[in-house]
């Protein structure tokens, strides 16, 4: 195999142009997250000031994420090389539409979780690191979405896991310790497979730069590539809680504070899905076809068993954990199809799921406090006392079920259409069946908690007029719910972004050119932007992608 330096002029290795102001947006979320994590850690004895600093950091992360998203939307994939080293040397950050969109939604979810925590997380838990851990985790999640190096993807996985371990154990109850043990074991197992795949990949390609691997992939023997792809699939599917390694999620997400469960529900499994999309569509698009049937079967089983698991639950928090799993199956369905329509549906559903699942956990947290229990067998009477909360709950129930006119409808239509277009009727049937079972499960929770009268002897609290408007938990919940409503009644901008993501994933040459330039030998200067591709139509021929 030729040396990685064979086609690179080493005399030019340090002469990349200095980055412009806009280029710094690529790494700004990481810098903000760690600077403010350190500041909040130093202020742990002053809880009020620590909270103000933490919320400022979360707000700044969102502002930067918005700016990065707008820059990528207007100018195309952005690349920044640390230390001005010529790729594939050094650390590369590359942000396409997929990474920028996921980073933006991460900023929204993170700020909402911070708002919710202002009322829920007590001063002791803040002193012991809630905001530092939250900022560390968000920094790891965001940077995982923008890194251009497969080893650094592993590094940011570990950073976000360290933050998530701290958040999960905060409180140190028996249930949290048990949940953290299960959560840690499965993640360590998945990490072991991840590292094995990375080592094998480096031995095969002589590089860990994603763009470099993508442009060399077709020149490497099929057998080793399939092996590496299979290892990555197991590792990332485990982290995404796909069948059959999904038992850790409902066993752990119901134990921490609701603010923690909410941010976990919105973000952590989506990092695994992002990694699967990046590996199978950017690095190994040919090998995705080899594993398409396996991915499709795993997708169908994940969505069906997740929905059935939700139907069997009496604890509202565990019910939502199974709905997260079911949603992962829908995301994998688009990967198994890999048509433009299917990938657009996956991208749209990921945005929807990150927002709606976060909101649902926040909703259940408020329901549990006002109803005095998370147990459906003991819940009831909430509609009579809190009709506004019932309206929000009904909206979110429609959204997660994929019913009109909310955000969950459109991505499911795209995924079903993509399945039918290529004749994969069983996958379309699985999507529709899981949606039907999900509707029953979530409406059962709504009926028991809101419509059914309160059990005898239970005195539900009546909040004073106007208190809801001052509750930061309600502010966060309403804001996320409004996003779902807007995405449902005005889906065109969301579909346009999803189509752009699908187009870029189906054409990895744009990602490669952003790093190496159109000639394939030198990187695009930091002061130049890669032109934005023309978005694919909302309904694209499924034949452009592989089929299971």
Image: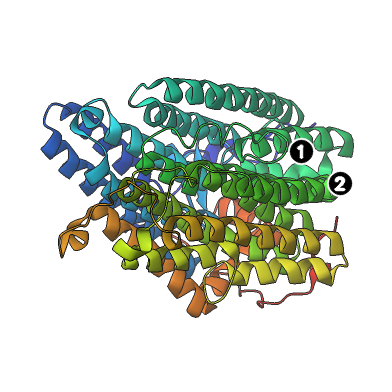
Location of residue 496 with respect to 384 vertically, above or below: below
| Mark 2 and mark 1: Cα distance apart in space | 9 Å
Quarter holding the C terminus is: bottom right
Label 2 vs 1, first from the N-terminus: 1
Residue 228 position, x and y percent, is: 77, 33
Quarter of the figure with the N terminus: top right
The x, y position of residue 286, in whole percent, is 82, 50
Q: Nearer the viewer, residue 323 or 73?
A: 323
The residue tagged 2 is 290
Q: Which of the two residues, 244 or 111, is positioned nearer the viewer here? A: 244
Residue 356's x, y, as percent? 48, 58
* Residue 189 visible within the image: yes
Q: Report the residue marked by disc 1.
A: 229
Q: In the picture provided, is 7 more to the left or to the right than 185?
A: right
Secondary element at image label 1: helix
Give the residue displayed 33% in from the left and 55% down from the top: 62
State the SS at label 2: helix
In this rendering, would 392 be left or right of 306? left
Q: Looking at the image, which residue is at 17% across and 59% down? A: 467
Give the vertical position of 202 relative to 429 (above or below): above
Q: Say if residue 93 shows up in the picture.
A: no
Q: Are marks 2 and 1 in contact (CB under 8 Å)?
A: yes
Crowding at dot 2, Cα within 10 Å, few <14 / some 14-19 / many 20+, comes out as some
Image location (x, y in percent) of residue 318? 53, 41
- Residue 317 is left or right of residue 474, and the answer is right
Kindly identify the residue that appears in the image at 66 percent across and 67 percent down. 412
Q: Nearer the viewer, residue 142 or 1?
A: 142
Left of 367 or right of it: where is 205? Answer: right
418 or 24, which is in the foreground? 418
Quadrant in the picture for residue 9: top right
Disc 1 crowd rating (10 Å Cα; few below 14, some 14-19, many 20+) is many
């Amino acid at each position: 195999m030729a040396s990685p330096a064979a086609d690179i002029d080493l005399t030019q290795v340090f002469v990349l142009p200095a980055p412009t102001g806009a280029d710094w947006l690529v790494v700004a979320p990481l810098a903000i997250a760690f600077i403010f994590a350190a500041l909040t850690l130093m202020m742990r004895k002053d809880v009020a000031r620590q909270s103000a600093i933490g919320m400022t950091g979360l707000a700044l992360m969102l502002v930067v994420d918005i700016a990065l998203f707008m820059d990528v939307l207007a100018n195309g994939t952005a690349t920044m090389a640390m230390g001005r080293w010529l790729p594939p040397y050094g650390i590369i950050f590359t942000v396409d539409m997929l990474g920028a969109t996921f980073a933006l939604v991460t900023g929204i979810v993170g700020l909402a979780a911070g708002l919710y925590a202002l009322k829920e997380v007590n001063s002791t838990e803040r002193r012991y690191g809630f905001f530092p851990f939250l900022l560390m985790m968000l920094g790891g999640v965001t940077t995982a979405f923008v890194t251009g190096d497969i080893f650094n993807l592993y590094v940011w996985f570990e950073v976000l896991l360290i933050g998530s371990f701290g958040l999960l154990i905060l409180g140190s109850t028996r249930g949290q310790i048990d949940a953290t043990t299960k959560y840690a074991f499965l993640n360590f197992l998945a990490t072991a497979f991840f590292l094995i795949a990375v080592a094998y990949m480096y031995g095969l390609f002589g590089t860990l730069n994603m763009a470099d691997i993508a442009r060399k992939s077709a020149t490497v023997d099929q057998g080793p590539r399939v092996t590496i792809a299979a290892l990555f699939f197991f590792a990332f599917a485990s982290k995404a809680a796909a069948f059959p390694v999904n038992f850790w999620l409902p066993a752990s997400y119901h134990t921490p504070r609701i603010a923690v469960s909410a941010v976990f529900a919105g973000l952590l499994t989506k990092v695994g899905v992002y990694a699967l999309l990046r590996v199978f569509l950017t690095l190994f698009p040919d090998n995705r076809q080899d594993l398409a049937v396996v991915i499709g079967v795993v997708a169908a089983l994940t969505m069906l068993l997740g929905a059935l698991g939700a139907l069997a639950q009496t604890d509202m928090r565990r019910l939502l954990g199974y709905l997260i799993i079911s949603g992962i199956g829908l995301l994998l369905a688009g990967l198994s199809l890999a048509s433009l329509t299917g990938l657009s549906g996956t991208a749209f559903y990921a945005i929807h799921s990150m927002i709606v699942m976060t909101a649902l956990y926040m909703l259940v947290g408020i329901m549990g406090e006002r109803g005095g229990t998370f147990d459906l067998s003991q819940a009831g009477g909430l509609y009579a006392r809190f009709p506004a909360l019932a309206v929000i709950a009904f909206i979110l129930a429609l959204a997660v079920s994929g019913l009109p006119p909310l955000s969950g409808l459109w991505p499911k239509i795209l995924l079903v259409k993509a399945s039918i277009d290529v004749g994969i009727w069983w996958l379309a049937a699985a999507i529709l069946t899981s949606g039907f079972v999900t509707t029953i499960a979530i409406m059962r929770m709504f009926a028991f908690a809101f419509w059914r009268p309160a059990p005898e002897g239970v005195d539900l609290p009546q909040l004073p007029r106007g208190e809801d408007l001052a509750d930061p938990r309600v502010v966060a919940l309403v804001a996320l719910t409004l996003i779902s409503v807007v995405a449902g009644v005005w889906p065109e901008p969301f579909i346009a972004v999803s189509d752009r993501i699908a187009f870029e994933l189906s054409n990895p040459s744009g990602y490669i050119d952003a790093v190496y330039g159109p000639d394939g030998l030198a990187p695009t200067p930091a002061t130049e932007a890669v032109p934005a591709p023309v978005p694919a139509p909302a309904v694209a021929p499924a034949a452009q992608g592989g089929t299971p």
